[in-house]
């Protein structure tokens, strides 16, 4: 492994990186804490069969930083963290592994709050809760906020309206064409919401059965994972894994807007600048997909679904502020959102 951990962490501002191993359950976990300046570091736990430890570390570091910015722009009293578990959730996720993971979270004494992400469920959070109280996103019937995927999709929908308003001068979605990459939980919910708005959908996913099941009731057109980039559409919505806007895909896009639920959609910041130069509006991912985090944050003071929904819909105003700053400063939207996040973090650090 050629990764200089301290150099990367200092460059990106990370506070801590924790490694956990439990030979009995087979747990191999990494918890990255980017910042606790605004509050405890909240972030989902992703279980994924990473090809190597370095890839898992990079994912944890990248995602935890995005969570800090997501909380900051959404004006939440939370910092950013992320847990990754190396393994195939369909084969290696066991109750003993989840208990061990809960004990790891507990050892951090509340600096990190765990929630579900790719490869994890609300039911898994209930098992983890037996080993630690520092859990969010468990079932509503047990006092939690439940699966955050629905609220993430609702927030993305509100953000998409703002994007259409910005580009076309009208927030109406009827008759628009949207290409969705990935129909997992959030992508499928978003597809359903867009269908009800009268949107023509193109869908793709790496799992053919899931794709067909989602597309059928929505009268959506199926396309391959490679073809999704070049579909002529109003909006391309990345809703799978990150890094999909890169040197290879930038020239393929035939859309006016990129806005979706995936984290870390840009492989690097230069790709956001390139979208800007190409005249493609980009909705910074950690702004538009903050609905799940906002929903989880609402658990802290006692969960109220109506209040949570109102706060999630506030993503529209956050995105309007990003686009306004982008135009005012003549900078790309991803740079504007970063300025907003850093400004809030700076206010907290500044002496009163």
Image (cartoon, rainbow, N blue to C red):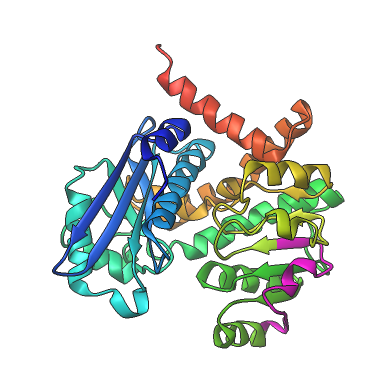
Q: Quadrant of residue 269?
A: top right
Tell whether 304 sits left or right of 317. left
Query: Which percent across, then down, holds residue 226?
Result: 71, 73
Would residue 190 be counted in the magenta stretch? no
| Viewer-nearest residue: 124 or 225 | 225
User: Is residue 152 something one can see in this rendering?
Assistant: yes
> Quadrant of the image for the C terminus?
top left
Q: Position of residue 319 (x, y in %)?
A: 65, 43
Give, as a single range, the part of the protein colored magenta.
218-236
- Residue at (37% x, 64% y) in the render: 146
Q: Residue at x 50, y 27 (%)?
A: 344
Q: In the image, 326: left or right of 267?
A: right
Task: Report the front residue among 296 and 20.
Answer: 20
Left or right of 282: which side holds 84?
left
- Magenta region includes residue 228: yes
User: Height in image: 222 above or below 26?
Assistant: below
Q: As rendered, which of 60 and 167 lies closer to the eye?
A: 60
Q: How many marks?
A: 0
């Amino acid at each position: 492994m050629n990764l200089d951990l301290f150099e990367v962490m200092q460059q990106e501002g990370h506070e801590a990186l924790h490694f956990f191993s439990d030979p009995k359950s087979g747990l191999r976990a990494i918890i990255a804490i980017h910042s606790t300046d605004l509050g405890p570091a909240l972030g989902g736990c992703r279980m994924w069969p990473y090809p190597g430890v370095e890839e898992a570390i990079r994912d944890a570091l990248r995602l935890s930083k995005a969570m800090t910015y997501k909380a900051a722009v959404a004006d939440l009293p939370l910092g950013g963290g992320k847990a990754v578990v190396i393994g195939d959730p369909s084969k290696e996720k066991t109750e003993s592994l989840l208990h061990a993971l809960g004990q790891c979270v507990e050892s951090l004494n509340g600096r990190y709050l765990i929630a579900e992400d790719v490869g994890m469920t609300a039911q898994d959070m209930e098992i983890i809760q037996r080993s630690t109280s520092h859990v969010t996103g468990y079932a509503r019937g047990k006092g939690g906020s439940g699966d955050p995927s629905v609220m993430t999709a609702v927030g993305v929908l509100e953000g998409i309206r703002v994007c259409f308003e910005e580009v076309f001068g009208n927030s109406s979605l009827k008759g628009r064409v949207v290409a969705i990459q990935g129909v997992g939980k959030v992508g499928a919910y978003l597809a359903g919401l867009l269908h009800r708005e009268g949107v023509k959908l193109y869908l793709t996913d790496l799992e053919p059965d899931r794709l067909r099941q989602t597309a059928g009731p929505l009268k959506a057109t199926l396309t391959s994972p490679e073809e999704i980039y070049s579909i002529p559409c109003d909006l391309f919505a990345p809703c799978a894994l990150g890094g999909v806007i890169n040197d290879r895909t930038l020239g393929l896009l035939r859309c006016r807007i990129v806005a979706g639920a995936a984290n870390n959609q840009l492989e690097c910041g230069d790709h956001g600048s390139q979208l800007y130069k190409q005249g493609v509006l980009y909705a910074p991912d950690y702004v538009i997909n903050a609905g799940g985090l906002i929903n989880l944050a609402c658990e802290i003071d006692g969960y109220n679904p109506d209040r949570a929904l109102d706060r999630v819909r506030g993503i529209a105003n956050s995105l309007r502020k990003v686009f306004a700053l982008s135009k005012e400063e003549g900078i790309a939207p991803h740079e504007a959102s970063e300025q907003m996040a850093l400004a809030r973090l700076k206010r907290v650090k500044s002496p009163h």
